[in-house]
Amino acid sequence: MTSVLHLDDVSLHRGSHQILSHVSWTVDEGQHWVLLGSNGAGKTTIARIASARLFPSSGTVDILSERLGRVDVSELHPRIGLLSSALAANVQNGEKVLGVVLSASYGRIGRWREEYDDFDLERAHALLGALGAAHLVDRSWGTLSSGERKRVELARALMPDPEMLFLDEPASGLDLAGREQLLAALTEIISSPDSPSMVLVTHHLEEIPEGFTHALTLREGKVVGSGPLQEVLTADTISTTFGMPLEVTYDRGRYAARGLPAGHGRRVAEAKG
């Protein structure tokens, strides 16, 4: 099986602070991964490295058969879709939705003096339509709700027809209805034979859509568990990942976690051992 991403013994430090410690991870074609862990665990940092937005202090990173550090990342970025709140924060409130989506073709945020052909326009309209956002095409960014923005951001991330798609906490800030609509859209994208390999960053098991296949869990910059979803999302591994006793349940394609009484704390210690 061909790999689309391979991290080998990757570490990152800032001064004396170790952010990532000896992380190795491989994503093969057709796989869809979840990066799971608490705040500060290193999830977003790994996603930034894996999407060629950040260089590690040590180790090697191969993305879409290109070695990070030996490739012009400006040529690699159009092959990698990214949905992140940091990117969305740079969109001007007056920017039209169509421009937000279209400008992804040039790796820009917002339209400037670029010229777009009929194919670009048709693709932007088709993506917005598929995500239930066709009616937003002429709206200004500043007038959109959180749920509407997420759908536009997802259309933008898909605009260049990426080979990989990174989703950094896509459900953050959404209400229940907005979250479920977004997860349903992601499940539909995954079901397509042309779907890019996806990597989803989240704190919550409840935000994992149906169709994701694998998970990498992190604690304090180190890998706790890695592999097929059903093998990693166990009570022991998730309890160790979050540092507290947790119960994990699975129902109709979706996972959930809840805390256990304090007397179950021994399970976490045993799992760490």
Image (cartoon, helix red, strand yellow):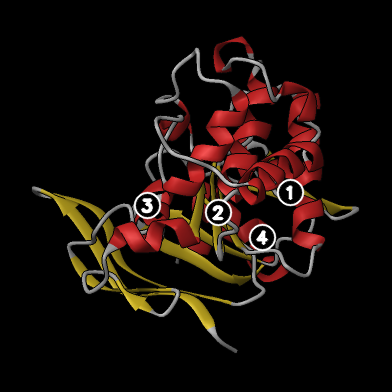
- Describe residue 135's horizontal placement relative to residue 5 as left or right: right
> Where is mark 1, residue-wise?
186
Query: In this view of the protein, can residue 203 be seen by the observer?
Result: yes
> Where is mark 2, residue-wise?
160
Q: Nearer the viewer, mark 4 or mark 3?
A: 3
Task: Establish if 272 lies above or below 167.
Answer: below
Q: Quadrant of the C terminus?
A: bottom left
Label 2 crowding class (10 Å Cα cut-off): few <14, some 14-19, many 20+?
many
Instruction: Report, in whole angstroms, how far the alpha carbon at label 4 lies from the one at label 2.
Output: 32 Å
> Where is mark 4, residue-wise?
233
Mark sitting earlier along the chain (3/2)? 3
Instruction: Report, in whole angstroms, how far the alpha carbon at label 4 lies from the one at label 3.
Output: 23 Å
Q: Secondary structure at mark 3?
A: helix
- Describe residue 94's horizontal placement relative to residue 86 as left or right: right
Mark sitting earlier along the chain (4/3)? 3
* Foreground pick, 216 / 78: 78
* Foreground pick, 119 / 90: 119
Q: Secondary structure at mark 4?
A: loop
Q: Amino acid at mark 2?
A: Pro
Query: In this view of the protein, can residue 174 be seen by the observer?
Result: no
CB-based contact (under 8 Å), mark 4 and mark 2: no
Task: Establish if 257 lies above or below 175.
Answer: below
> Where is mark 3, residue-wise?
48
